[in-house]
Amino acid sequence: MTLDDQRDTIERALGERMLNHCLTILRTWINEVGEQTYSNRYHSLSDNYQALFSYYLSTNDPERDRLLDEMTGQAYHLTDDIFADICLKRGRVESMTGFDRESSTSIMMYFMKCMRIQEEDLDWLCDAACDENQYTKALIAIASLVSNLKSFFQEDAILALIQCLDSDSEVIKQQVSASLLMLLIHYDVRIDFFPKVQDAFMDKIGDGEDMFALLCGFLQSTTVKLKDLMNSEHFDSEQIPTELKDLIQHVSDQTGGSDGNGIMNWTPSNDNEYIAGLIAILPQTWLYDALVGEDEERAEKLARAYLEGGMMDLMWNHLDEAEAQLIEQLRSEHATAQDFINYGHICFIRGDRTMAYENYRQARQMIGAAKPFFALFRPDRGHLVDLGVPVEQVYLMEDNLIKV
């Protein structure tokens, strides 16, 4: 098992608060690094975890969940610290102790590659973001840091980004806000165990209205690109990477909550795939709860933004609204095969099998080949069945769309 495989295994295990799975691998890492401080932290965590399990067997004290969350957070911190040292020891990254604050290149390289950004350097970033004479350097540092954080989580660095929202520069605030949205979705499983990040973010965004508006704008700008892909005459299901298909299928099967096999374990080959993956898991994330929660107006706005991009994810329980919006989209010259599929789903659920078939057939003809059509149709099978379509009818309809 490679180092990256081990790290992914730890991520999945800690996402489910399964500390022993993590500790088994950490033990081998500590042996390689040979750092006594890590060994002490390891044994303290291991002993406390075993004591907690013994306590769990004999009592129903609800405090045990809080304690387990705290221990999971400690395990994440220990994992990150040891992983950084192993990468340095194996020569996967360079040892970096600072940067030239007058050199844009030095700023970029430091914030992009350093796995242990120093506190004074994060302080410089926060100050630069609020100094109009340093805005350009701050933007370079922020963009570089976000690229770094997508690969290696650093709590203090994310807290510094949140602090940068105090900038008077709208450009910086927009860049930081968009970056935080992506990172908080990206690390959704982890964020549950980093309350300092959650609290700092919530304190900084106030009522969240500006951040929510940015989220909707982000969705609308990116889903248009995905829609263009689906509407392309050259669309082929092979253009959708297997990892993304699996991720989207996994999310569509979810009934709520997220599990340890989150986005951080999926490595897209380009930015479009990365953004598509973030969009796919958004409704199951802490960020969604933070910005939308029980606010019905925001939930409706976000659902409409999704549907504009061809995604029914948030509309399955609001078929009347979805139908009205889809009718408008189908009347436009930009209607996609996915729009016809979605409208066919609504007809199918309503019992109008003829109209459902006609819309599915239209989508099938637009796409051309059967394989890419079914790549769009099949992830929704479960929703159709859950909303009352007998599974036998779903298979019958699908079988008669192989040829049109």
Image: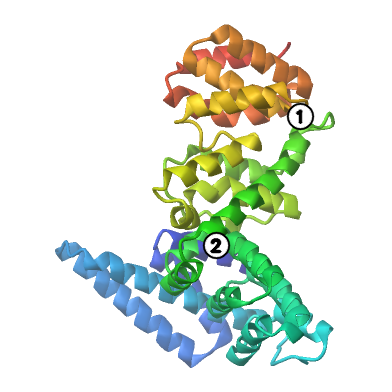
- Quarter of the image with the N terminus is bottom right
Q: Residue at x 52, y 82 (%)?
A: 30
Q: Dot 2: few (<14), some (14–19), or many (≥20) neighbours within 10 Å?
A: many
Residue matched to label 2:
184
Question: Judging from the image, what secondary structure is the residue with disc 1 in?
Answer: loop
Q: Is residue 303 above or below residue 3?
A: above
Residue 152 appears in the figure:
yes
**In this orientation, which residue lies closer to the viewer: 66 or 175?**
175
Toward the top, the furthest residue is 354
**In this orientation, which residue lies closer to the viewer: 96 or 43?**
96
- Quarter of the image with the C terminus is top right
- Number of labels in the image equals 2
What's under tag 1, amino acid-wise? His
Residue 206, horizontal then vertical, whole percent = 47, 66
Q: Is residue 146 left or right of residue 64?
A: right
Q: Is residue 404 above or below residue 346?
A: above
**In this orientation, which residue lies closer to the viewer: 393 or 338?**
338
Residue 227, horizontal then vertical, whole percent = 72, 37
Residue 395, horizontal then vertical, whole percent = 55, 16
Residue matched to label 1:
334
Foreground mark, 1 or 2, reads 1
What's under tag 2, amino acid-wise? Leu
Question: Judging from the image, what secondary structure is the residue with disc 2 in?
Answer: helix
Say whether marks 1 and 2 touch (CB < 8 Å).
no
Residue 27 appears in the figure:
no
The circle drawn on residue 221 is: none
Q: Dot 1: few (<14), some (14–19), or many (≥20) neighbours within 10 Å?
A: few
Q: Quadrant of residue 234?
A: top right
Q: Residue at x 76, y 91 (%)?
A: 101
Sequence-wise, the earlier of marks 1 and 2 is: 2
Residue 401, horizontal then vertical, whole percent = 67, 14
